[in-house]
Image: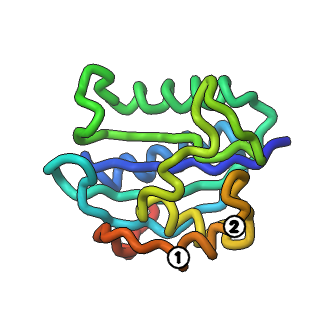
Amino acid sequence: MARIYISIGTNTNRSYHIQAAVSALGQHFGQLTLSSVYESEAVGFKGKAFYNMVVAADTSLSVAQCVALFKQIEDAYGRDRSAAKFSGRTLDLDLLTYDDAVCQQPVELPRAEITENAFVLWPLSEIAPEVIHPITGQSYASLWLQYTKQQKLWPVPFQWS
């Protein structure tokens, strides 16, 4: 079984899509570890604020199978694949890590967003503080403590139904 970390983001009907993503992931992976839900300003474009979180799961699926599953879930919740790269999202699921895998295909692992975006690193450091980034050799808690980019991000009280 591989330990995977998945980022979830949405800026459209945010509470609904966060809950839908967690529910769908739970159906496929069983027990999940959930970070807090964070609100962040859109990065790379002007748009509505996002809700973001990170989820940990264990899986026997391959990297490619995980990525295909995430696309299937995104599509089921109205993801517009023709939209610009930096635009609003009903649902965005990204595989951040797959155990200690380092690769470029079928996706980049670990994802660069881990060290680039507060809305990924903060929730990841919350649920996996002692886990070591496979390239930097530093824990996610250490990476978060050293994070200096100015991105507006704050935890939000979230009501799970």
Does residue 154 lie above or below 89 as drawn? Answer: below
Q: Identify the image quadrant of the C terminus.
A: bottom left
**Dot 1, crowdedness within 10 Å: few (<14), some or many (≥20)?**
few
Q: At x 55% / y 66%, what residue is drawn?
A: 35
Residue 134, position as x, y percentages in the image: 72, 52
Query: Disc 2 marks which amino acid?
Result: Gln
Say which amino acid is labelled 1.
Answer: Gln
**Who comes first in sequence, dot 2 or dot 1?**
2
**Residue found 29% across the figure and 70% down from its top:** 152
The numbered dot on residue 6 is: none
* Total residue callouts: 2
Labels 2 and 1 touching (C-beta < 8 A)? yes
Farthest bottom residue in view: 145
Residue sticking out furthest to the right? 1
The furthest residue to the front: 136
Which residue is depicted at the point 73% across and 71% down?
A: 130
Question: Which residue is label 2 attached to?
Answer: 138
Q: Is residue 101 above or below residue 116?
A: above
Which residue is nearer to you in this view: 36 or 15? 36
Label 2 sits on a secondary structure element that is loop
Quarter of the figure that contains the N terminus: top right
The spot of residue 89 in percent (x, y) is 29, 40
Colouring style? rainbow
Q: Residues within 10 Å of mark 2 (few under 14, many from 20)?
A: few
Real-space Cα separation, disc 2 to disc 1, in angstroms: 10 Å
Q: Which one is in front, 127 or 134?
A: 134
User: What residue is at 42 percent from the left and 64 percent from the top?
Assistant: 118
Name the residue that disc number 1 marks.
146
